[in-house]
Image (spheres, rainbow, N blue to C red):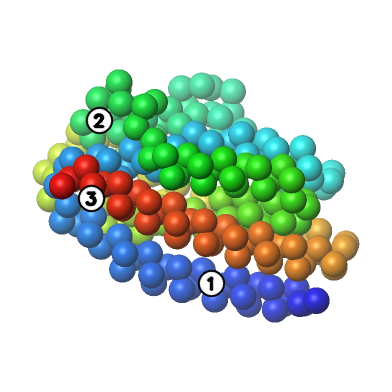
Amino acid sequence: MITREQFWLMTDQARLEAEYMVDEKLEYLQNVPLEVLQEICLQYRYFTESYPDTLGILISKTPPGKFKSLIAEILSEELGSGNAEAAHLKIWDNFLISLGVNEDRLEISADTNNVNLLKELMQLTKDRSTAYAIGLRGMGGECLCQVYLTAMHKNMLNNSYIKMNDSNIDWTFWDIHVGEADIIHNQMVRQAINEMVDAVPTRINDLAAGYHKAKQSWDIFWNNIYNSALVKQA
């Protein structure tokens, strides 16, 4: 069994590798035409749509304590804290529409491979151990997602269309997700996981396996987005 310290060393190393790889991979956003940028952003929508439901499943599996309360708070924020107009899916759709995506496309454009991948992640969250599900979605959804969003935002800002139309784009989603709030979330998740692992040290191996699966799934998810955009560009 790995130790808690070894686990965090592994996840920190994986995150550093992901930050380097993802930033390099998403550099193409600086030069793609608007149609490709729209398609890439549209495909990310389906993660945003599925994430709250998966968090709900994770909460139902998690024992009472700091982690359960924290994930419940994150879920509430995802759903707008009682205000449907502030739900993160809604504000992502506002961003898409301000980017010129036709509203009629929002519900019908999901890449089939990613639909199946998101269904698999939801099923794994249901079926596997609580520790595995926490690594998969509590850490994978909350912590690894932020790596991709940060790189996406940084490179997208250098796109010529974005530069020329910055003032017409609804940046609300990005103001929430690329900045201090998400960094604080990540720190709080880490502290809450430490408490769970200290209480039951044997959880650590399943936690690591879930995190590894999350990283693998994120790589596949974004490769599918990239390939889908290229096909529609051709």
Could you say whether the residue bearing mark 1 is in a helix, strand or loop? helix
Quickly name the residue at label 2.
101
User: Which residue occupies 74% across, 45% down?
Assistant: 127
The structure residue drawn at horizontal position 60% and vertical position 70%, both measured from the top left corner, is 11
Q: Is residue 101 above or below residue 28?
A: above
Mark on residue 32?
A: none
Find disc 3 in the rendering and name its residue. Answer: 230
Q: Amino acid at mark 3?
A: Leu
Q: Which class describes the residues within 10 Å of circle 1: few (<14), some (14-19), or many (20+)?
A: some
The part of the image, by quadrant, that contains residue 55 is top right
Reading the image, the residue beneath label 1 is: 14
| Residue shown at the point (62%, 42%) measured from the top left | 122
Kindly state the secondary structure of the residue where label 2 is placed: loop
Looking at the image, residue 195 lies above or below residue 100: below
Which is more N-terminal, label 3 or label 2?
A: 2
Residue drawn at x 30%, y 21% is 104
Q: At which x and y percent is residue 13?
A: 54, 76
